């Protein structure tokens, strides 16, 4: 009887051990499954705010067009923005490279020390996602983390693809004409002039004042 009881105990112990190993293996497989970096539909993004600690760029959707609201609402480069959003949407995260407070500073993904701070908003100005991007572990890779998590991952993103200056997002087709000196839009005027080094520079001008000057010039011609 004692032998049977002992064997039964051993059998129960083996079953418990096997069950524990199965659960552990299942959890490990689940944790090893790649997950999308973004937990929302990329088509919801209506606004991007990119900061690098020295400057910032704001990209806003207006109808079907992307504009730069802090740069006289000039058109932004749609291909550049689409490429960035597509790349973000394709990012997969799996095993974190670190998850400690000290690591955030070392990999430059902390609120106090970062290379890029990216915020994505929807049409109602609701924050969809917030991320910190920092040092590079390899070619076209960047350490990054979700702002509300400690885990840091190696992402297939290049910080150079997220410039934090509005001018870097300007739609360059505005300047595709041969040697233009002025570009006018519904509510903006870009004028070219020379600086003290005899270099061409573009600057925003007052659209109303420019229109008055053109009207005066036409009147003088008449």
Image (cartoon, rainbow, N blue to C red):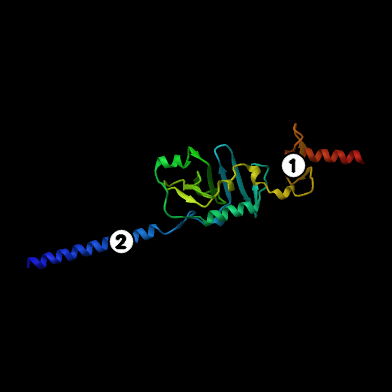
Task: Quarter of the image for the C terminus: give it.
Answer: top right
Q: Which residue is mark 1?
A: 190
Compared with 195, 27 (above or below) is: below
How packed mark 2 is, by other alpha carbons closer than 10 Å (few <14, some 14-19, many 20 or more), is few
Q: Quadrant of residue 9?
A: bottom left
Q: In terms of sequence position, does the residue under pointer 1 or pointer 2 come before the other?
A: 2
x then y, percent, for residue 81: 61, 52
Q: Quadrant of residue 210?
A: top right
Labels 1 and 2 touching (C-beta < 8 A)? no
x then y, percent, for residue 189: 75, 42
Query: Label 1's element?
Result: strand
Residue in view at x 47 percent, y 50 percent: 154
Q: Which residue is mark 2?
A: 23
Query: Label 2's element?
Result: helix
Depth check, mark 1 against mark 2: the one in front is 2
Task: Residue at the far front: name it.
Answer: 139
x then y, percent, for residue 60: 61, 48
User: Real-space Cα distance between discs 1 and 2?
Assistant: 65 Å
x then y, percent, for residue 211: 80, 41
How packed mark 1 is, by other alpha carbons closer than 10 Å (few <14, some 14-19, many 20 or more), is many
Disc ID at residue 123: none
Residue in view at x 38 percent, y 60 percent: 30
Nearer to us in this view, 213 or 49: 49
Q: How many marks?
A: 2
Residue in view at x 30 percent, y 61 percent: 23
User: In the picture provided, is 71 more to the left or to the right than 96?
Assistant: right
Task: Quarter of the image for the N terminus: give it.
Answer: bottom left
Task: Residue at the far left: name it.
Answer: 1
Task: Residue at the far right: name it.
Answer: 222
Compared with 23, 52 (above or below) is: above
């Amino acid at each position: 009887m004692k032998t049977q009881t002992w064997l039964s105990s051993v059998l129960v112990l083996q079953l418990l051990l096997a069950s524990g190993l199965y659960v552990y293996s299942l959890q490990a497989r689940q944790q090893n499954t790649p997950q999308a970096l973004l937990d929302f539909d990329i088509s919801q993004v209506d606004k991007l705010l990119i900061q690098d600690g020295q400057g910032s760029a704001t990209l806003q959707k207006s109808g079907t067009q992307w504009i730069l609201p802090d740069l006289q609402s000039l058109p932004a480069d749609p291909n550049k923005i689409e490429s960035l959003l597509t790349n973000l949407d394709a990012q997969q995260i799996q095993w974190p490279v670190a998850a400690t407070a000290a690591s955030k500073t070392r990999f430059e993904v902390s609120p106090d020390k970062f290379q890029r701070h990216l915020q994505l908003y929807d049409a109602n100005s609701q924050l969809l996602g917030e991320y910190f991007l920092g040092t590079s572990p390899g070619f076209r890779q960047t350490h990054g983390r979700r702002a509300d998590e400690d885990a840091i991952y190696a992402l297939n993103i290049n910080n150079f693809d997220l410039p934090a200056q509005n001018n870097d997002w300007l739609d360059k087709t505005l300047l595709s004409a041969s040697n233009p000196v002025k570009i006018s839009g519904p509510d903006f005027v870009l004028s070219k002039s020379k600086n003290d080094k005899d270099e061409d520079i573009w600057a925003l001008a007052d659209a109303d004042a420019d229109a008055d000057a053109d009207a005066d010039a036409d009147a003088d011609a008449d």
